[in-house]
Amino acid sequence: MPRKLWTSNRTVAAVGVLALALVWGAALPRIATRCGYARAIDDLVGVGVEPNAMYYTEHPGAATWRRELLRVATAASDSSGG
């Protein structure tokens, strides 16, 4: 009895990899340029924070953390004369 196309493990894996590639390669970069994310990234880069190292930006408390991070980074920059 022949196997149905969608029951093949290889087909399911290929569809999963394709979906992941579309999200990673198309959707996430597009989101990063919209909705204030680009401005937030620019703000963090401006005070020397590597935005690629952040994973918590979707947390409800992220705005508070971001303000505190920017305050501390600005204070450190001001006190070091930079």
Image (cartoon, grey):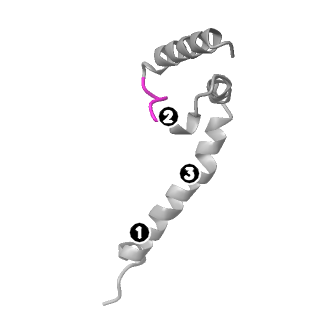
The residue furthest front is: 80
What quarter of the picture does the C terminus occupy?
A: top right
* Kind of residue sitting beneath label 3: Trp
Residue at the (38%, 79%) spot, across then down: 4
Q: In this view, does 17 lie to the left or right of 43?
A: left
Of tags 3 and 1, which is closer to the observer? 3
Q: Give the mark nearer the N terminus: 1 vs 2.
A: 1
Numbered range of the magenta stretch:
55-59
**Closer-to-camera residue (66/31):** 66
Q: Mark 1 points at which residue?
A: 12
Q: Which-is-in-front pick, marks 1 and 2? A: 2
* Label number found at residue 24: 3
Secondary element at tag 3:
helix
Label 1 sits on what residue type? Val
Percent of width and height locating residue 53: 51, 38
Q: Name the residue under label 2.
A: 54
Magenta-span inclusion, residue 42: no
User: Looking at the picture, which amino acid does disc 2 mark?
Assistant: Met
Find residue 46 and report its image quarter.
top right
> How far across and down, in percent of the image, does residue 70 sit?
57, 16
Horizontal and vertical percent position of residue 48: 62, 27
Under tag 1, what secondary structure?
A: helix
Measure the alpha-carbon separation of dots 1 and 2: 31 Å
* Inter-mark Cα distance, 3 to 2: 16 Å
**Residue at 48% across / 63% down in the picture?**
17
The reply to whether the C-beta atoms of the residues labelled 3 and 2 are less than 8 Å apart is: no
The span from disc 3 to disc 1 (Cα, nearest Å) is 18 Å
